[in-house]
Amino acid sequence: MVQSDFETIRSVEIACSVIETLQELDGGGITEISNRTGHSKSTIYNHLQTLEENQLAAKEGDQYRLSVRFLDVASHVRNQSGNYDVIRDELDKAAKETGEVVQFGVEEHEKVGYLYKAQGNRAVQTISSVGTYQPMHSTALGKALLAEFSNERVHEILDRQGMEQRTENTITGREELFEELADIRDRGYAIDDQENIRGLRCISACRWGRYHPRRSQRLGAVKSVQSGSAPRRATETHEEHGERHRTQQQVLVTERTVDSQLPIGIPEA
């Protein structure tokens, strides 16, 4: 886990814990939230009252839930992508044509943050969802993003985040990862061969974009998820190989289409 070099504010940590618990429980009462968070009922009551006063929580009887104010916050974050409609439309199109899960993510907190997710008619179940994070070293999205960074920055990320072994296929050595990043730069796309979740293969390609004219350049990446039971690509059947190739091409087409229609990232003034 990343170690902070500053002192956190206890009351803010508690408020964040209350918000997360309200999301996990889909709403709840003071006693339930107190038991889940480990904080006293009086502390939970005060924080819930404060959240309600700021229209971040709503009360119905003795139950609290997150308010619609969070929809406004989420919409703002979503629209920071530069042109969310382009991302949504192109990923929906790719999901329909491939039948797979297609996702768009960015680097945030030195992890992959998911901005949009589309599902085709043959989509497999994944643990990723909009607004959540996954490691960079074990995901196609993450490796596609890392391949665009300098080696120094990649080392800094690995120093803080580590290289957790998620499956038997996860790359856990830096030398092997940097070799993989070099291959990604050469071929133009990244592959997660059951490295984050057993049974799932993913293909990803990067595009440049921006979150805001006054902010630095930000990278985004398109990813498609395929099911697969073989431990390595060498065991693929001819049909599986053809299907993977078609999906790779669709990911690249989608990435280029999104890239061509989004504003180009510009450095801070």
Image (tube, rainbow, N blue to C red):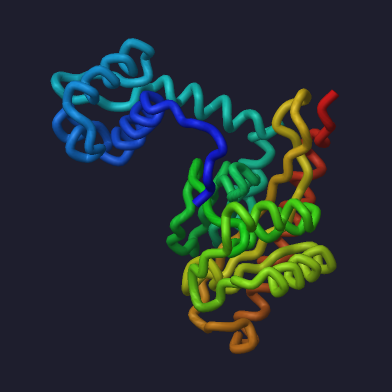
Q: Quadrant of the C terminus?
A: top right
Q: In x, y percent, where is residue 220? A: 70, 46
In this view, the residue in front, 144 or 154, is 154
In this rendered view, identify the residue nearer to me: 203 or 110.
110
Residue 83 position within the rendered picture, expressed as x and y whole percent measured from the top left: 69, 33
Q: How many labels does the image show?
A: 0
The answer to whether residue 76 is left or right of residue 72 is right
- Taking the view exactly as shown, the residue that stands out farthest to the top is 53
The residue sitting at 21% across, 20% down in the picture is: 45
Quarter occupied by residue 51: top left
* Residue 202 falls in image quadrant: bottom right
Observer able to see residue 181: yes
Rendered residue at 56%/72% (across/down): 170
Residue at the location (78% across, 39% down)? 261
Q: On screen, 11 above or below 253? A: above
Residue at x 30% of width, y 41% of height: 24
Q: Is residue 119 left or right of residue 66?
A: right
Is residue 98 visible in the rendered image? The answer is no
Residue 134: horizontal and vertical position, in percent? 53, 54
> Is 203 placed above or below 262 here?
below
Q: Where is residue 17 in the image (x, y as percent from the top left)?
A: 34, 34
